[in-house]
Structures are given as C-alpha cells and as structure tokens.
Image: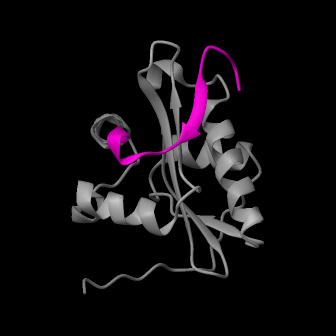
Amino acid sequence: MVAPYGVREFRISDYDAAHTLWEASEGIGLSAADSRENIQSFLKHNSGLSFVAQSEEGSLVGTVLASCDGRRGFLYHCAVDRASRRQGIGRELVKRSIAALAQRGMRKCHIFVIADNEEGKQFWRKIGWEERTTILVMSKDV
C-alpha cells in the first residue's frame, strides 16, 4: 500500500462515504440491495472480509465488500476514488479481502463486472483475474 493511505475493516459508519464513492464510480451498479440496512446485514454476516482505504486526512478513498457462501468467495463494489487511482489502493483492498477469504477456507473467488466496464475489466485482468465467458449470470427478484 502506498502511503499516505491506510486500510481497515469496513464499518457501517463508513456507509455514507462509501455510497457516495459508489455513486461516483463508473461500473458500480447500485440497487435497493445497497441500502444502509442491507449493507449492515451484509457486514454482520461477513465480518472481517470487507475493507476501506482512508487518506491520511481520514477521507474514504476506496472500498471492497466481500462475502462467502461456504464454498467460494465473492467481491463487490471494489471502488477507488478517481483522484486516488493507480497507487495500489484497489490492489491492496482486494489482497486483504482475498487473504481473509482464504483464512475461511475459500479456494476461489468471483467478482461480477458490468460487461461494458472496460476500465474495470482492465484492472481485474492486470491483477491476475480471468474472464469466464462460459458462465451466464441469471437473476430473479425474491
């Protein structure tokens, strides 16, 4: 991690700043699932897996949410403030979540990337992730 940024576990008190970052980040798809209440539940059920990056002044400049289903890990909302990109922040956030998932026994992790998010796809490829073209994601509101 390049100073002057620090990484720590994501807390619900980070929600407002994180949501503002997500809204400003291309390629982050937001929905009702991203309400404060839902994120609070997500963090409770996946404690120790999600992280934020903060500037020396204390402003939130990056996030990653992570979960696991007992077999695999999943990353969501990996975002870095545009002015803070290309300093290793996204890579460090992902590294922390992957390490936490590995400690829980997860041997594989997935992330959903919006198909036309070219910058996002470039980032994931650069840090060693592979595009899976044989999987189609299907969804249903419950």
- What is the quadrant of residue 129 in the picture? bottom right
Q: Quadrant of the C terminus?
A: bottom left
Of residues 6 and 138, the one nearer the viewer is: 6
Q: Which residue is drawn at 28% across and 65% down?
A: 33
Q: Residue 135 placed where, x, y %?
A: 58, 80
Residue 122 in sight in this render: yes
Left or right of 47, for residue 37: left
* Left or right for 76, reference 48: left
At 78% from the left and 72% from the top, the residue drawn is 107
Q: Quick check: 51 above or below 54?
A: below
Residue sitting at 52 percent across and 65 percent down? 46
Residue 8 counted in the magenta span? yes
State whether residue 78 is above or below residue 114.
Answer: above
- Range of magenta residues: 1-14
For the residue pair 10 and 138, the one nearer the viewer reads as 10
Residue at (59% x, 21% y) in the render: 5
Q: Where, quadrant-wise, is the N terminus in this rendering?
A: top right
Q: Where is residue 98 in the image (x, y as percent from the top left)?
A: 70, 56
Regarding residue 80, the answer to whether it shows in the image is: no
Quick check: is 113 in the magenta stretch?
A: no
In the displayed structure, does residue 96 sit left or right of residue 53?
A: right
Closer-to-camera residue (7/31): 7
Percent from the top left, x then y, of residue 65? 50, 54
